[in-house]
């Protein structure tokens, strides 16, 4: 009986756990003299998954979203437990605007004009480093092509 109960519990945990996404590629970016270790979401499944279900993210890590076309892309925080700041970037990696996002909300946070990339970091990362719209994020040119 105990073995059956343990098996049922293990099965329930397996079925209710968030689906682990495949390992995303990583890229080193820079903002001024700050180094950023970013996961790259360059395909639709990875962009849809984003940083959902994560409880922590190291200080200088983030996620770079690579869009197939420049547009007024929007982000939201469904199933995302971390407070984040998102910088929308143009083709050259210049910051268009930065939006602060609260966990588990469905508010849209959108690019102020056509963006080709979005970089999510822990809430307040950009402001704490004095990084503002117009600043350039280096290394964007090394990102994988969107799919």
Image: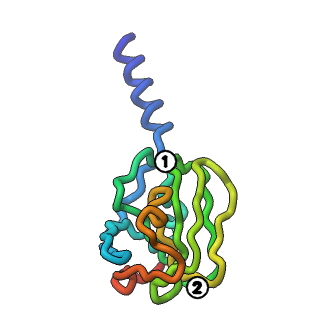
Give x and y (percent) for residue 55.
Answer: 44, 44
Give x and y (percent) for residue 124.
Answer: 49, 59
Give x and y (percent) for residue 56.
Answer: 40, 47
Q: Residues within 10 Å of mark 2 (few under 14, many from 20)?
A: some
Q: CA distance from mark 2 to mark 1?
A: 27 Å
Count how many numbered circles sit on residues in the image: 2
Circle 2 sits in a helix, a strand or a loop, which is it?
strand
Q: Considering only vertical position in the picture, is 26 above or below 146?
A: above
Give x and y (percent) for residue 113.
Answer: 65, 83
Which residue is pictured at 68% across the width and 54% down the height?
106
Task: From the viewer's perspective, tell me whether residue 68 is left or right of residue 71.
Answer: left
Q: Residues within 10 Å of mark 1 (few under 14, many from 20)?
A: some
Which residue is pictured at 63% across the width and 69% down the height?
74
Q: Nearer the viewer, residue 46 or 93?
A: 93
Q: Label 1 near label 2: C-beta < 8 Å?
A: no
Q: In the image as oriented, which residue stretches furthest toward the bottom?
A: 92
Provide the residue designation for mark 2: 70
Colouring scheme applied when the structure was drawn: rainbow
Q: Earlier in the sequence, mark 2 or mark 1?
A: 1
Asked if one can make out residue 67 in the rendered structure from this viewpoint, the answer is no
Circle 1 sits in a helix, a strand or a loop, which is it?
loop
Task: From the viewer's perspective, tell me whether residue 78 is left or right of residue 22.
Answer: right
Which residue is pictured at 46% across the width and 66% down the height?
126
Q: Considering only vertical position in the picture, is 126 above or below 53?
A: below
Label annotation for residue 104: none
Q: Quadrant of residue 22?
A: bottom left
Provide the residue designation for mark 1: 53
Asked if one can make out residue 140 in the rendered structure from this viewpoint, the answer is yes
Which residue is pictured at 39% across the width and 10% down the height?
1
Q: In the image as oriented, which residue stretches furthest toward the top?
A: 1
Q: Considering only vertical position in the picture, is 45 above or below 79?
A: below
Task: From the viewer's perspective, tell me whether residue 53 is left or right of residue 101.
Answer: left
């Amino acid at each position: 009986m105990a073995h059956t109960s343990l098996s049922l519990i293990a099965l329930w945990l397996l079925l209710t756990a968030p689906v682990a996404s495949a390992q995303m590629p990583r890229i080193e970016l820079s903002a001024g003299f700050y180094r950023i270790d970013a996961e790259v979401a360059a395909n639709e499944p990875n962009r849809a998954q984003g940083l959902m279900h994560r409880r922590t993210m190291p200080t200088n890590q983030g996620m770079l979203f690579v869009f197939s076309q420049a547009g007024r892309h929007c982000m939201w925080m469904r199933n995302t437990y971390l407070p984040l700041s998102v910088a929308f970037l143009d083709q050259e990696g210049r910051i268009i605007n930065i939006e602060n996002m609260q966990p588990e909300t469905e508010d849209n946070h959108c690019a102020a004009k056509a963006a080709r990339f979005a970089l999510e970091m822990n809430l307040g990362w950009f402001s704490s480093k004095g990084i503002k719209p117009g600043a350039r994020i280096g290394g964007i040119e090394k990102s994988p092509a969107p799919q």
